[in-house]
Amino acid sequence: MPFWLARAREEQAADVLTRFDPRFWTVNFPRPMMAAATNPAADVLRVDAVFYRRDDLAGIIWESVDRHDHPLLGYDTDRDYRACTLRFRWRSAGVRALDRIDGPTLTIEGRDAAGLPRAWYVRLWNYAQGTPEDAVVTLDFATLDAGFALPADRDPVWAGDIDRLFVSLVAPGYDRSAAALDAPAEGWVELSEIRVDGAGAVLAIGDVVLPAHDLRVASGYDDHYHLTPARLLRNALQLGYRGAIDHYVGMSHYFRLERAGERWLVSRRGGTLNGACAAWHADAARRAAQLGYEWIWSLSYELLDQHCWDDWKQRAADGTPALTGWDPPSTLLSPTHAGAMEYLHAVARAFVAIGATAGLAPRFQVGEPWWWITADARPCLYDDSARAALQPVAVPSLRVPPDAAQGETLDRAAAALARSTAALVAAVRRDWPGCVTYLLIYLPTLLDAAMPGARRLNLPRDWAAPAFDVLQLEDYDWVTAGDTSASARGAALATALLGYPAERQEYLAGFVLRAADRAQWTPILAAAGAARGRGVAARYLWALPQVLRDGLVYWQGEDEMDAFDDVLFPLALGREAEVAPGFSTAVTVSAGGYETRCVDWAEARTRYDVGPGVRSEADIATLLAFFRARQGPARGFRLRDPFDAAARDEALGSGDGRTRRFALVKHYGAATRRITRPVAGSVRVAVAGAATAAFTLEPFGMVVLDDAPASGAAVTASFDFDVPVRFAEDRLSVARATYLAGSAHSVPLVELREA
């Protein structure tokens, strides 16, 4: 899979962008409040917000450095604003008005003329004409003054070195205390008719457009709630992602909250989605439909712990709630709690309704539903609703095979989990009978060999086809650890257990949690390629925020097609065939006759001439057809070397207690040759002299043992092998005389280096 990780735009295509383009503003705010930026029109920025505390403050932000777009699609950095004037119409409701104390203020962060860090606070009302909730604001950065009352508080702004601009929004009840508002306060602001004039009005912006390719992309609202949908979809479209977007609605930003004493908990009445979230997703759905995307709404059983009702949470036997490792932690909703499940039904229906209103076909995914398992392998089956529904016995650890009573408890819990997902799908289909449904399962947890009870608990038989339309598999822990054999076995086992054929499966590859681990994209894309080889219907990269952060550039062209046909050269070679191993050695001779020799290749590269082995007119016809099918030297193939096609008891390495992957090699005295095309079924492996069948043979001759050999244990293998080769020339010359004679003068082949 051809790809690279861009860090900056260099020679790639660029366009121009008007500074302060509405698509490129962001929002920021403290929990639990919520805000979202959208673009109802090309010159309009709208921010919807909901406030819960008296000190909640949202910022509408323009940054001089583009930290959010893909490196090839971001705008250029220009911190000098002195040569531009920004003009816009301000309209607002439900937020403190322009003329009030603590009303909308433009904070300018940067450095003064001496290079010292500074912040200036510009009261927008000082530059407004109109009413406090409907005014035209004009900001000439060359003559801008901070201060509340002008000219008395005048503090000239030096706009030559600005990092960011920050417009503050607060609720009408703002008083700088942390006390809760009596009720949620919703408000909005629109900056419309945005116009920028002056020499500093234009920025260069990346305008790379990759051809559409065969990978799709996933997204997560918790990761990019602060960006506009227009900005995100621009990146997805221009990076070549098409088809469906698998959109996880998240666990921490979508919900509407209600006050319960001193806490804010997810609302059980009056709607499920907060206004900002609903506005963001309505804009995203509308734009996705216009761009021809399909949209899969993904909802999990996960919810931010601090806003979850206590009786909804899954709990371990000691009463501790199920908590994930995120900061702050999320919890898992109990599949047996009627209120928690009714809440999920309402959330799912609300999101699918947003998509349907925008013209998107209904698609809904149940994302990674499970009973939580603590870090010490205890199942969370003991909240009050689960105790009543399951009558569970104690299961101290899923690492120990369950006894009969424990097994029955796990079976009852699995059945309850399946009933909950079936009810969730049914709730969506009551509104949209034709909704396409997806189940996403995470194989490393469900098939963890160290926890034999996990599969029994969290992989119900009732999930088998046709419970869902599409089965989606995810296994990124295996992938990023390089455990490709576990990925292959896991996919095969899930297929066997649940019965979804490959054409009704999809695969989610990724993700890269930390920017420092961006090298993990190599195995992730390889895993996506392996999934294509299994014949799955679609493959997704998880997720778009990481693709943008790490600068992933993926493309698919002719070189993406497998340039090797896994077929054997069709003619048996006799002893007349010529075999010529060769090296590339640069020899430099000094004036005194001394030589310096530089060896370019560590291994020999063999050339063959199979022309002398052609014996009949039928052979000539077969050779010509085979040459045409390979497009001459364009495509490789296998050749059985008549002089060297077997290896016996070859040493692959020795164990260290951790390593499981060993490459097939053949030794020629002190020389070593990598074998990448073993003959199917011929590989025999031994560990410490004992034959073992507990291994997987991966592409390019990689042996992956099920268990890491003990330290010092010798790993050996015996096998037959073919040589990967291609035709050496673009022409195959066969004259009439040679055709009738049934011979070819010369048919040169050259060995391919694959590892």
Image: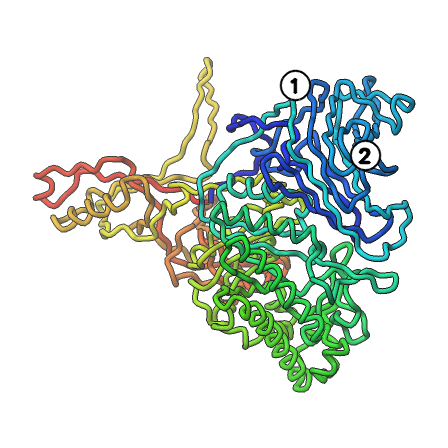
Q: Residue furthest bottom?
A: 404
Where residue 460 sits: x, y (%)? 58, 75
* Residue ID at (65%, 21%): 197
**Residue 123 visible here:** yes
Q: Residue furthest front?
A: 131
Pick the front one: 454 or 432: 432
* Residue ID at (60%, 31%): 8
Earlier along the polypeptide chain: callout 2 or callout 1?
A: 2
Q: Quadrant of residue 396?
A: bottom right
Q: Looking at the rendered structure, which numbered label has been put on residue 539?
A: none
Q: Residue furthest top?
A: 591
Disc 1 secondary structure class: loop
Q: Quadrant of residue 350?
A: bottom right
Local packing at callout 1 (Cα closer than 10 Å; few below 14, some 14-19, many 20+) is few
Where residue 649 sits: x, y (%)? 46, 58
**Residue 375 visible here:** no
Q: Looking at the rendered structure, which numbered label has been put on residue 198?
A: 1
Q: Looking at the rendered structure, which numbered label has been put on residue 105?
A: 2
Disc 2 secondary structure class: strand
User: In the rendered view, would you say 89 is above or below 394?
Assistant: above
* Residue ID at (61%, 23%): 202
Where residue 132 sits: x, y (%)? 79, 36
Q: Quadrant of residue 326?
A: bottom right
Q: Give the residue type at disc 1.
A: Gly
User: In the rendered view, would you say 169 is above or below 365?
Assistant: above
Asked if the residue under mark 1 is in contact with the one under mark 2, i.e. CB atoms within 8 Å, the reply is no
User: In the rendered view, would you say 153 is above or below 353?
Assistant: above
* Residue ID at (55%, 40%): 234
Local packing at callout 2 (Cα closer than 10 Å; few below 14, some 14-19, many 20+) is many
